[in-house]
Amino acid sequence: MSAGVAVHQLSFGYGKDGRSAVSEVDLSVAAGEVLAVVGPSGSGKSTLLRLVNGLLTPTAGSVHVGGRDVTRASPEARPVAMVFQGYALFPHLDVAANIGFGLAVRKAPRSERRRRVLEVADRLQLSDLLHRLPGELSGGERQRVALARALLRDPVVFCLDEPLSALDPVLRTAARRDLEQLLRTDGRCALYVTHDQSEAMTLGDRVALLRDGRVEQVGTPRELYDTPATTFVAAFVGTHPMALLPVGSLGLNAAAGVATVGVRAEHVELVPGTEALVTAVDDLGHEQVADLEVDGHRLLARLAPGSGLRRGDRTGLRVSRHTGFDAAGQRVA
């Protein structure tokens, strides 16, 4: 696999005590691939991006971009473009000047700057906005200006740190589609940090889940959802987290060494019976999600709209599929 970016045993510690924000991370992203990076707050997502783009220097390990070791290179010397959460546009410069700022700093000829700014503005549908200030733009337009400025660097890799988080839900969906089209069409690789799992699952060819600065699992979105490597992944990935129950719950058979069974909401079928208490029903329009309590344990069930189930009802259930984990929280094959 031809790697646009690769990090090996990458580590970084903060403060005098050297508290690890990123620890022994091994990842590679091929040319044309998008790696979505997810994890709870403080897991090291943004630190990883800053190590790749050179805003931080690792305490150990290496960073390669485009096949070149850039571990000690300055940010300006790396073929990396960063798009920040707040876009980082200059409020006193118009759109054209914001897009071409990097070229101006490098003292590129004015004619070249104008040509390249017009080219990238046309690609991102910004041609009619070049003389506006950032304060006169919508959130989606500001996001496209930030992407245009990054694209003008002609990077090997895009580093995107929650670039859509400031947008409202409607704009966010549209901007996500525009961003996906740009990344797919351009064929560059990207590290995409997000706390939004729908973004990670939609945009990422693969997903890396970080926990306490380490990679908990990396794989396709489907692999993380269907075959979580640990109970942490199982409980983190998915709009509805996997229920984790002690072995023997619900009468489920388990392989030797299994201490915990995990059950996804779509694998719970309601049948006649009374063993489960319905503690809540969330109506999401396209589906309902029932919160069930069985022998002091909680699990979820996905239902068709208009199921008629209500809080306080009792029901039976049947589990069609489950995942086993050992005492250390590792998946049992």
Image (cartoon, rainbow, N blue to C red):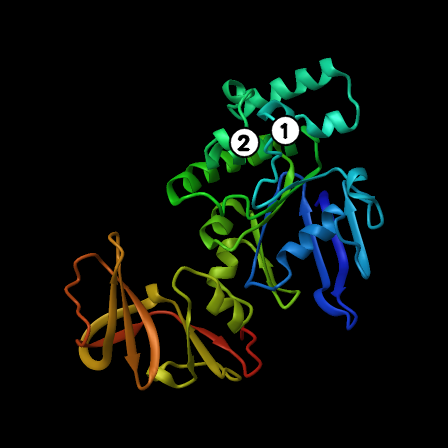
Comparing 110 with 21, the one in front is 110
Position of residue 245 relative to residue 203, above or below, is below
User: Which residue sits at x=54%, y=73%?
Assistant: 331
Residue corresponding to mark 1? 98
User: Which residue sits at x=51%, y=55%?
Assistant: 195
Where is residue 117 drawn, in percent x and y? 64, 21
Answer yes or no: do the residues labelled 2 and 1 have beta carbons within 8 Å?
yes
Q: In this view, does 221 lie to the left or right of 98?
A: left
Position of residue 279 relative to residue 187, above or below, is below
Comparing 173 with 146, the one in front is 146
- Callout 2 crowding tier (Cα within 10 Å): few <14, some 14–19, many ≥20: many
Where is residue 320 drawn, in percent x and y? 33, 69
Question: How many numbered markers are drawn?
Answer: 2
Q: Which residue type does callout 1 highlight? A: Asn
Mark 1 element type? helix
Position of residue 80 relative to residue 207, above or below, is above
Q: Which residue type does callout 2 highlight? A: Pro
Position of the C terminus, as image quadrant, is: bottom right
Query: Residue lying farthest top?
Result: 111
Instruction: Give the image quarter of residue 310.
Output: bottom left
User: Which residue sits at x=47%, y=40%?
Assistant: 176
Q: Which circle's residue, 2 or 1, is located before the other in the chain? A: 1
Residue corresponding to mark 2? 134
